[in-house]
């Protein structure tokens, strides 16, 4: 089975991967939207800063579904490798279906991440040996520029190897097994579950953990490894990346001592250990699941959306597109396009604290998995509830209430936004929400006033007026009773 994908240029204009996972049965209840990165130019012309580095999967094998978004950095190779290897480790291991408890499934997923990390780094054994051999050819004590002046060919080879070794990826995957949802992630790609509460109000719950330097738990973990808290907490990168966890990137793992800010750690500070949540019973309250790379929510934050509100904003945009799109791919792509347009307009107008010639937007991937949210314009084969889901009592009549969240404006008025109130997943996997809501329904208004007469389709006033006139004139036909 191939584990390293060969890049190819597709008709979409970015580097993709030929993968055996392309032949897996596609989950029809999911759709993906994406956009390549963009470097903004003053003349408005489009320019990409680097080849597209995201990867995604949405497949279904019998009653098991696997979804994933991978946000690569310094290349797409690790993202492609992780996608293929995790799919193999999860979908084709017969031990998965012997797991009877949530703890057993979570441990199975943890071991899958560990196995993928181990096999990926092991694939670089030859590169590491070459790197070590080249390093010995450069005398100790030389500064970087001195080494390049005396040994340019060796330095260029070392740089090429280091670039390959620095390739890594985030990963957020969702597994649906026995009608339960499990989510695992490393890095800052997100998973959001949108479900209705007991009052029928749509809530959004973040099931993943952002592994970056804004995460206090991650800062504490790094501090316990011996890294200076103040230096790490006020930085934005660890070695050559921003995430505190990832798959791949040997340079911040096996070679972390080479980075000044990581050298004091007692063990590898960047880990591939995933955070795992689940299993969550997929009952009728679960509406849809979103998996996304950080390019989506960070682009929205750059336009002025508050960090604490960005998940809600994304969920609202998705529910809006459910109303007007006919496919789930259309839903996902429409949301991505809106975010791209907002970000582009902000930077081209000089907003966001950067001039138009200095702004950049990262790659974006959004995966939408529908459980039982109405997609009114869908063909019969799209947007229907998953066969492994309990029937939605509102689906037959399409009478799902649309609940509108009222948000106060600075002027004292109110603006309406689509479904979705922000809530955070706490230690007991419960959500909290404090927003005030009012409800409206998509059902057409009905007239239950029986005293009001229904207007006729044809106006017979002239007919009856002529009959009365004929009676007075005595010219009504005798054979017809009026």
Image: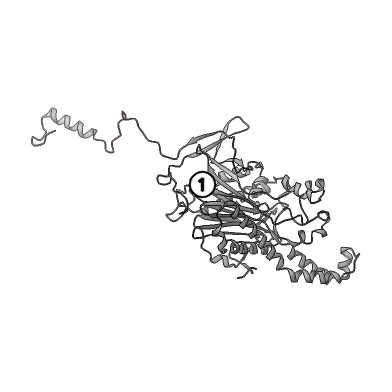
Q: Magenta-highlighted stretch: main secondary structure?
A: loop
**Which residue position holds label 1?**
287
Please state the horizontal and vertical placement of residue 182, each as a whole percent of the image: 58, 52
**Up/down of 31 relative to 2, above or below:** above
- Residue drawn at x 67%, y 51% is 188
Give the image quarter of residue 308: top right
Mark 1 crowdedness (10 Å alpha carbons): few <14, some 14-19, many ≥20: many
Could you tell me if residue 47 is visible in this image?
no
Q: Nearer the viewer, residue 396 or 267?
A: 267
Q: Give the left or right position of residue 47, taking residue 370 as reference.
A: right
Q: Considering the image in quadrants, where does the C terminus appear?
A: top left
**Up/down of 308 relative to 95, above or below:** above
Q: Determine the secondary structure under disc 1.
A: strand
- Residue drawn at x 30%, y 31% is 453
Could you tell me if residue 276 is visible in this image?
yes
Q: Is residue 453 magenta?
A: yes
Q: Nearer the viewer, residue 183 or 17?
A: 183
Question: Start and end of the magenta stretch?
Answer: 451-456
């Amino acid at each position: 089975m191939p584990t390293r994908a060969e890049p190819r240029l597709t008709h979409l204009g970015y580097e993709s991967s030929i993968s055996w996972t392309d032949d897996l049965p596609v989950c029809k209840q999911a759709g993906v939207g994406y956009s390549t990165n963009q470097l903004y130019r003053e003349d408005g012309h489009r320019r990409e800063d680097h080849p597209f580095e995201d990867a995604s999967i949405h497949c279904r094998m019998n009653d098991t579904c696997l979804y994933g978004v991978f946000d690569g950095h310094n290349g797409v190779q690790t993202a492609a490798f992780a996608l293929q290897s995790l799919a193999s480790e999860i979908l084709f291991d017969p031990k998965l279906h012997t797991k009877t408890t949530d703890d057993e499934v979570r441990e199975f997923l943890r071991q899958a991440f560990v196995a993928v990390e181990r096999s990926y780094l092991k694939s670089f054994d030859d590169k590491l040996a070459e790197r070590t051999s080249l390093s010995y050819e450069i005398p100790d004590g030389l500064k970087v520029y001195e080494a390049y002046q005396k040994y340019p060919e060796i330095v260029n080879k070392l740089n090429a190897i280091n670039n390959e070794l620095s390739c890594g990826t985030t990963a957020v995957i969702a597994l649906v097994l026995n009608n339960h949802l499990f989510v695992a992630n490393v890095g800052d790609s997100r998973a959001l579950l949108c479900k209705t509460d007991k009052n029928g109000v749509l809530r959004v719950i973040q099931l993943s953990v952002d592994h970056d330097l804004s995460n206090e738990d991650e800062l504490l973990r790094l501090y316990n490894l011996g890294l200076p808290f103040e230096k790490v907490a006020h930085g934005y990168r660890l070695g050559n990346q921003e995430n505190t966890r990832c798959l791949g990137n040997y340079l911040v793992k096996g070679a972390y001592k080479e980075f000044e800010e990581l050298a004091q750690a007692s063990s590898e500070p960047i880990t591939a250990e995933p955070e795992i949540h689940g299993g969550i019973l997929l009952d009728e309250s679960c509406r849809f699941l979103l998996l996304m790379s950080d390019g989506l929510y960070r682009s929205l934050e750059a336009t002025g959306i508050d960090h604490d509100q960005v998940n809600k904003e994304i969920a609202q945009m998705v529910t809006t597109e459910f109303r007007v799109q006919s496919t789930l791919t259309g839903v996902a792509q429409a949301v991505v396009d809106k975010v791209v347009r907002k970000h582009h307009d902000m930077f081209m107008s000089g907003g966001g604290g950067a001039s138009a010639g200095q702004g950049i937007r990262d790659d974006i991937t959004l995966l939408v998995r529908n459980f039982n949210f109405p997609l009114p314009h869908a063909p019969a084969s799209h947007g229907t509830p998953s066969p492994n889901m309990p029937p939605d009592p509102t689906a037959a009549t399409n009478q799902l209430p649309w609940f509108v969240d009222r948000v106060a404006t600075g002027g004292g008025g109110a603006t309406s936004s689509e479904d979705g109130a922000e809530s955070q997943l706490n230690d007991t996997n419960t959500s909290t929400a404090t927003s005030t809501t009012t409800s409206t329904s998509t059902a057409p208004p009905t007239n239950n006033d029986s005293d009001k007469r229904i207007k006729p389709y044809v106006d017979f006033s002239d007919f009856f007026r002529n009959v009365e006139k004929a009676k007075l004139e005595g010219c009504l036909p005798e054979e017809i009773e009026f």
